[in-house]
Image (cartoon, coloured by chain):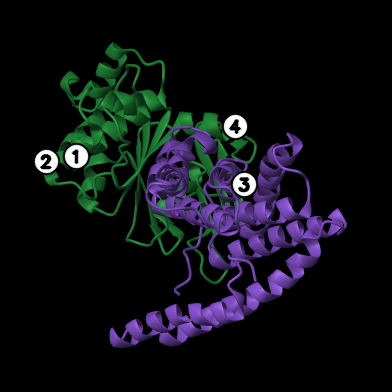
Chain colours: A purple, B green
Amino acid sequence: MTDTDIGLAGLALSGILVVVAVVLSLIRRLGIARDMVTAAVRALIQLLIVGVALGLVVEDDSPLVWTWVWLVAMVVFASWTVGRRAPEVPQARRLALVSFTAAAAVTLGVLFGLGIFEPSGRAMVPLGGMMVGNAMTGTVVASRRIVAEARERRDLIEARLALGLPASEAFAPHLREALRTALVPQIESTKAVGIVFLPGAMTGLILGGVDPVEAVRIQVAVMYLVLGSVATTTSVMAIGLTRAMFTTDHRLRWVSSAPES
Amino acid sequence: MTGSGFELRGVSVGAPDRRRLDAVNVDIAASGITVLAGPSGAGKSTLLRLLNRLDVPDEGTVRWQGTSLDDVDVLAHRRRVGMVFQQPTAFPGTVADNLRLAAPLTREDDMVALLDAVALGAGFLHRDALELSGGERQRVCLARTLATDPVLVLADEPTASLDPEATAIIEASVLRLAASTGRHRTGWVWVSHDADQTERLADRVITLDRGRITSGGIDD
């Protein structure tokens, strides 16, 4: 066991923190203790399976094709998740798939095409995961906001259309507002990094024994990756959604509201 | 009446068992004031939205000056046939910003003339549009629609949420614009369920009830 390998005993002991959370929720009668236990156990099982599978993909002698299969699977699963989490968004899965593919091409193209990272499974899988995970959250927020703007501001959008403005111009102020809502948290989090919190990748690298300055360099590249991927996915999603919500003769389609949860 | 205004033939909107408009045949002139009258839910607003191409019929055809709206440049059409909505839809910014959105190259003296056409003084030009009263905002919306030099304005109960004083000012402006011989002379299609207002404004009345024309249609 290295000094950062916590071993099975360490893993079991860290479970004390789950017990603390469960006890606190029971004392406060939050009614979420069962959910907490389920989430903790589920995370453990999912990550153990992923860890084993990841071991096969990131081995130095493992063919790169498995890395690509892994990345494609992540993109497809993330697109499916966007569709599930944003049921009121028209063509959500298809548009998310296009958005994630575009973001992967741009961000991974820069990181690996310019030689910032070596194109290996060990680098591509975790970076792809960071890209898709963050982009998925941003995409759900942006697409739901875009659809809500179209529904709630229908009167203003149609007033612009009635003046002879094309759909893209009639919707532009509302699209801007929705994209700002999705991107501002990412920018704020980028600003606060290092002061308010230490990001996960950097923490993991330092715990793994990497020199902190080297860890910072990698972390900064990861943060730029995340910012670039969120900006790319939300922009592509915005273009796709505008086309989906307006007809070619500049009419705003009737968009249904989100189902009651 | 081919060539002068709208012709609707066999126009239906909505599923067959829940028609909002049902086999409507009517001609609507491009000049004077045509009032679409009828109770709430009669289909007046639905009909008006078809004329601005904000909606399309499920059956039938809508023609403007002899050409089906399926075949016109919809953006150009909307500038020739403007629309004012029931609730004032002022945009953020000054009144001048609102007018420039409709016609970006409008000069300041032309903007003052537009405000004058709706009984607002030049002092309103640089005021924040969202801080005006409901009646003033609705008049800004009217002026904004007039900025595109429309032949005809579709007005969807634009005074429904206004007090009698604001309503009287807008009605006077509309009567003046409809009878004008100047640049801002326009025809009007005015939706109302107020019989007194219909009497005050209408050159012609088309009455709807439950999606059907009950008077003023070509089948009468």
* Residue indicated by mark 4: B73
Real-space Cα distance between discs 4 and 2?
A: 39 Å
In the displayed structure image, the side of residue A31 where residue A51 appears, left or right: right
Q: Secondary structure at mark 3?
A: helix
Residue B125 at x, y = what percent?
23, 22
Q: Nearer the viewer, mark 2 or mark 3?
A: 3
A144 in relation to A109, above or below = below
Identify the residue under disc 3: A240
Task: Indicate which disc, 4 or 2, sits on the residue closer to the N terminus.
Answer: 4
**B148 or B43, nearer to the observer:** B148
Are marks 3 and 4 in one subunit?
Answer: no
Q: Do tags 1 and 3 sit on the same chain?
A: no
Which of B153/A110 is in front? A110
Same chain? Circles 4 and 1? yes
Disc 4 chain ID: B
Q: CA distance from mark 1 to mark 3?
A: 38 Å
Q: Dot 4 surroundings within 10 Å: few (below 14), some, or many (20 or more)?
A: few
Image mark 2: chain: B
Q: Secondary structure at mark 2?
A: helix
**Mark 3–mark 4 CB contact (< 8 Å):** no
Q: Residues within 10 Å of mark 3 (few under 14, many from 20)?
A: many
- Residue lying at 48% horizontally and 32% vertically, measured from the top left: A164
Pointer 1 residue: B135
Distance from disc 1 to disc 2, alpha carbons, whole Å, reads 9 Å
How busy is the neighbourhood of tag 2: few (under 14 within 10 Å), some, or many (20 plus)?
Answer: few
Marks 2,3: beta carbons within 8 A: no
Give, as a three-letter code, the residue at label 1.
Answer: Gly
